[in-house]
Amino acid sequence: MDKPNTVDRRKFLSALGVTVGGVGVAGASLIAPQVVKAATEPAKGKIPDTPYKTGHMTFLTGPAAVLGDPSLKGHIMAAEEINAQGGLLGKRKIETITADEAAGTDANVKELRRMKLEGKIDLFTGVISSGNTPALGPVAEELSLLTMFVDGCTDFLFDVAVPNPKYTFRLTNIQSADGITAAIGAAQAWPQTRKIAHLHPDYSYGRNASEHFTLAIERLLPGTQVVSESWPKLGTTDFTSHITKILSSEPDLLFTSVWGGDYVAWYKQALRYGLFDKMKVATTLAFGVAPHALGKDHPEGVLAGVHSNYHFTYPGGDRWPINKSFVQRYFKRWNEYPNFQSEGSYVTLHMLKAAIERANKLMGGWPDDEMIIGQLEGMGFDTPSGYLYIRPDNHQGYKDAVTGFSKNNPEYPFPTWDQNRIITIPIRNITAPANWPKPGKGHNESTAAANWIKTTWPKSVG
Amino acid sequence: MRWLRERSKVQLAAVAAAVLLLLALLPPFIGVYQTQLLTYGLIAAIAALGFNLLLGYTGLLSFGHSAFFGIGAYTVAFLARDAGIHSMELYILLGLPISALLSALFGYISVRHTRIFFGILTLALSQVLYSLAYKLFWVTGGSDGLRVPRPTLLAGLVSFSGPGSFLRFVNSYYYYVLAVFAVCVVVMWVIVHSPFGKALQAIRDNEVRAAFLGLRISRFRWVAFLISGTFTSLAGILWVPLNGLTTPEILYWPFSGEIVFTALLGGFRNFSGPIVGGIVFTYLKTYAVATTEYWQLLLGVVLVMLILVLPTGIVGAVSRLADRLKAKGKS
Amino acid sequence: MSILVIQILNSLFYASVLFLIAAGLSLIFGVMRIVNMAHGTLYAVGAYVTAWLMGKAIALGVPLGWLFLLLPVGAGVVALAGFVIEPLLLRPFYRRAEEYQLLVTFGLLLILEDVIRFLWGGMPITADTLQDVVPIMHIGGLVYPGYNLVVIGIGALAAIGLWAGIYRTKFGVMLRATSQDRRMASALGINVGLVYMSAFAIGCFMAGLGGAIIVPSQAAVLGMGVDALILAFVVVVIGGLGSLQGALVGALIVSFVRTAGIQFFPEIELAVLYLIAAIVLLIKPTGLFGNA
Amino acid sequence: MTILLKTVDLRKQFGETRACDGVNFVVHKGEFLSLVGSNGAGKTSLVNLISAHLTPDSGQILFEDKDITFMTVSERIKAGIARSFQIVNLFDGLTVFDNIALSIFSRDGKAGKIISLAEHDDDVRRETLEVLGQFGLSDKTAVLAGGLAQGERKLLDVAVAYALRPKLLFLDEPTSGVSTHEKAQIMDTVSSVVRAGTVTAVVIEHDMDVVFRYSDRIVMMHEGAFLADGTPDQIKMNKDVANILLGVPLSV
């Protein structure tokens, strides 16, 4: 260590709490396993038996339906489970109305207002696009509508659009964690990387992934350089020219945040151009889509991100029964495996149920929104993906970031993770702390996380 | 003779006043949701009114009017973000000249062609704006768009913050938009009944003959384009505060398709057609999206049926029906 | 150097598909004076049908080489759809203003997009088995999928076939006569209705073929048609609506500019294409090869 | 007699066809002149050249001794040349009243007025009604032009051009496509209106009865050039005319 602001990379990574492997310390952040049990205790006080109305908005049409479909399935399954026990507090059955996120942002704003003011929903949930949550969050606040976004992960939502949320929550990890997780995974696995190529969908998600990956990698692997950048439009299916451009820049590593149907088209073309033989590949969302959307031809050894949230094979085996049983039930119900959207919207309803039950235990009767919000703030919850914590200051869900390397395991008809190389990172180590200044308040970085990394992360060596 | 003319105008004014009064009395009865939806409808009506000056009165089908809606919306967003302006009046006062300037520019380029080439040229130009709004991430926020906080109304006299402000905003804003809408209707009515408006219709019906009256065709088309774009921009200006956010979607070509749909739905050969179309389409799309995930199919079927069965739109069909009834009453 | 060769091949590959779509669009406009906004979606239908059939065929154990036969089959299905669409939806509008024709195809676009989703769901469908039937090639130190050359070949064949069909056959004469003057053609005893129907079906066939040949190397995904339509528009605007040479040259220009854009100015690649289209329209509104 | 319009060696060629083959055409002020000839003789082309609907290959057009060869349509209209069309060219979506009023607005440079109601211009209104009266269309003011009968459309077509108050008015077959009975009616109206005012009229006409009855002078064209020029009586006597036009010698 020659300068005070540099640090040995291995020490740096371990200081970040990065762990690799399917077992061992990875489970450290998981609290004692417990199965989601039926509410055995009867609810206190008088509970109305009117239905509890939820509005679930997700992509039912268009290219992003590949994520929207699992989201709705997770939601439906949770509602069915809760209703099978008589409903919330044993009385209120969950009713769902759906809305198509693909109708466009302005139509979504109208639809949210309609759901609340006309459909009289009690809870708004779902939402995938990071373009939509910043539009819908403020609307939910102005409507005083309890809202639990499953995704729509942009930092912008709680950094800027709704800086002081009251009614709005979000369960999945924030966007900046995606790029940083991929950077850590890449630095961990391929420290020799010097030349990096970028390929991102040309919208805010791609921009954010690129920016945060670069910020992190500059500190984890100083001296790397960006040798190529490509920004295909979201929905592009012809990547041949992008692939050739990437090949021509001869990088050691390609970092990409292309996802969904675009990713499927991309990897199939990249395969035939021999791209995977020439470089390492790190992604943020390769395994984010419904697992069966990928084929066995998917190359092995790719850092296959899941939006740093959840892949159904982890935590695996009997080590975390909540996940095992969730995956089994999900498969039984839908004849397919869940993705992070399925898990997110499934957890959303169960978390709400827990908050309602706790509030009921404290006060009796049906809790009002304020009491439910009080319970959700700071709540810790065991979920299939591990321990989820709702930070009280910004209503953002935090769980350990996770990513892994693709491998063709014989028991599945599609690629999954190499169980021995799963990387987990405690989320607090890659996100700005609670009171860190937001963009526009003392700094003009795009996110609080970006400013935090620039200010506090040292440069590593070795 | 003059008296006769005045009488028909008084009748018209009476009908308009009655409709306006009805609209003004509605909010307490229909609740906040319908009030804000109706506000969206009135805004769509303003956009369609502007669009129809070109389609219905000048005979030019623009497939790029999303550009002007977007220009209005993004102008407000920039004023709010970069100039710290939060007054609706300033949005309008500053937004209109900017919109007019850009409409004039687009129009200057576009009116050199007619028919399908005009449509494709306007489409291409609007797509240039779309791709810029989408690609210039650091200026326009890319697909995230730009947020616009609630502005103050009436030079800061009415402002909205604190609890329940949304409800107050919706109610006040409804009347605000209604007032602007009323002004727009009157202005547009005067325009289409002015010598200029008559000249546009003449150009629409018979370009060659219009030229042989000494009318300078492309000059008239250009001015019509300018007015049309500015009206549609005004709709964009009014739309942003209600929506709270603007994204490149409103610049994308299917949104232009919706504007065309709107005019056709109401009937573009009628003055009131686009107004009715704007309001009906707002409800149609909202409830289609709410009712079925196959809302695109629903809208497509409605569009095709409309063209097949009701080519003159709702207003055209209703007025034909009224004529027939009147004729029956006489005989 | 080999990179340059590959980028040129990539551009030709992309141009082949774009040409198929744009030529169909242009043909339909040339003969029927209809700008078919649903054309991109018909291309998507071709992709979906082909991928779906291929999945079935592979499951049935059809020898891999035979799968190539499914490409024209997929395109044929779209042509059949054209035979239904033209008399049902378009024929009632020939005497009406062109805005109605434009809008009716816009309605068709909305309908077909949902029909695709209803039939095949939201997941991408792949058909890449066919791609591996053709060996990978080596160019310099790089590899290149041989299948892409097949696509380029099909594109070239389609261009020649279309040209021959229009300029060297009796049907082509009828087609051209009808496109010049419908009434005159009808007076000369040409069955204009049949010519229209055939022209529309051929246009659909071209779009469907574009979808069929692209799907093995990519995947059939929702929304692919709307994107393709806009690019095809750019092609015909540059080349000239209604002109076959225009579609060919336009497709080449668009795909080479796009490739150059990806390589050298990725930030504004898209805007550049629209700008070129707008500039061509300004200078020569009928496109490089069009006549009003 | 004062010369109002004069063309000097005017030429226009379409491919092999010579539409105007060095035409020297003179129109005198105040006359009612007929332009006759078989189909394709070049009559309409000549009118098109003079009204700026076509540009000549060579030659000169002088109007009131000014060279107008390179003036635009609107400049020539301002100078005082107006025309009607062989195939009726009206604004079908406007009322009969508005069809005429628009001519007057345009003539007076008022057509660009945006923020004022057309019907509130009393001067224009008065004049419009007057023109409609002259052409016998007073009871059709509020009817859409598209809804008129063919004879009325022909009249309105002339009236629209007439309302520009041109010095020189070209009428391209004002009676084509109507019954014999209506023909007389139209020509009576047109000629009385023209003679009452200060208009010089050039009429393209096929019906020789009509031509002989109403014209002061007749010019005959054949294959892009002038064949004969004279009073109706002179033309009647001209053997060439009779041969070409009627195919039979006239009995005197």
Image: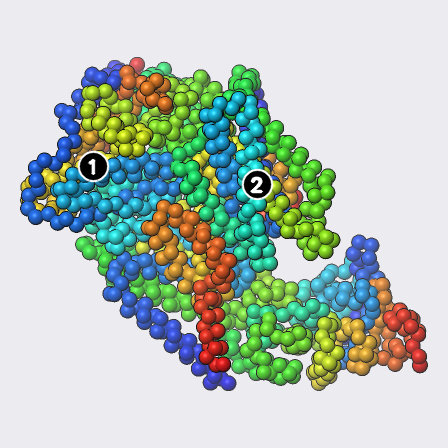
Does residue A226 appear left or right of residue C292 in this picture? Answer: left
Q: Residue sitting at 20 percent across and 50 percent down?
A: A144
Q: Residues within 10 Å of mark 2 (few under 14, many from 20)?
A: many
- Position of residue A461 relative to residue C177, above or below, is above
The residue nearer to you, when weighing A147 against A322, is: A322
Q: Residue sitting at 49 percent across and 60 percent down?
A: B309
Q: How far from the left and from the top, in percent, is residue A276?
A: 43, 19
Corner quadrant of residue A76: top left
Q: Which residue is mark 1?
A: A81
Q: Is residue C223 visible?
A: yes
Q: Are marks 1 and 2 on the same chain?
A: no
Q: How far from the left and from the top, in percent, is residue B172?
A: 27, 62
Q: Which residue is mark 2?
A: C79
Callout 1: residue from which chain?
Answer: A
Quadrant, the C terminus of chain D: bottom right
Distance from disc 1 to disc 2, alpha carbons, whole Å, reads 48 Å
Callout 2: residue from which chain?
Answer: C
Q: Amino acid at mark 2?
A: Ala
Does residue B34 appear left or right of residue C43 in this picture? Answer: left
Q: Residue sitting at 79 percent across and 70 percent down?
A: D6
Circle 1/circle 2 CB separation < 8 Å: no
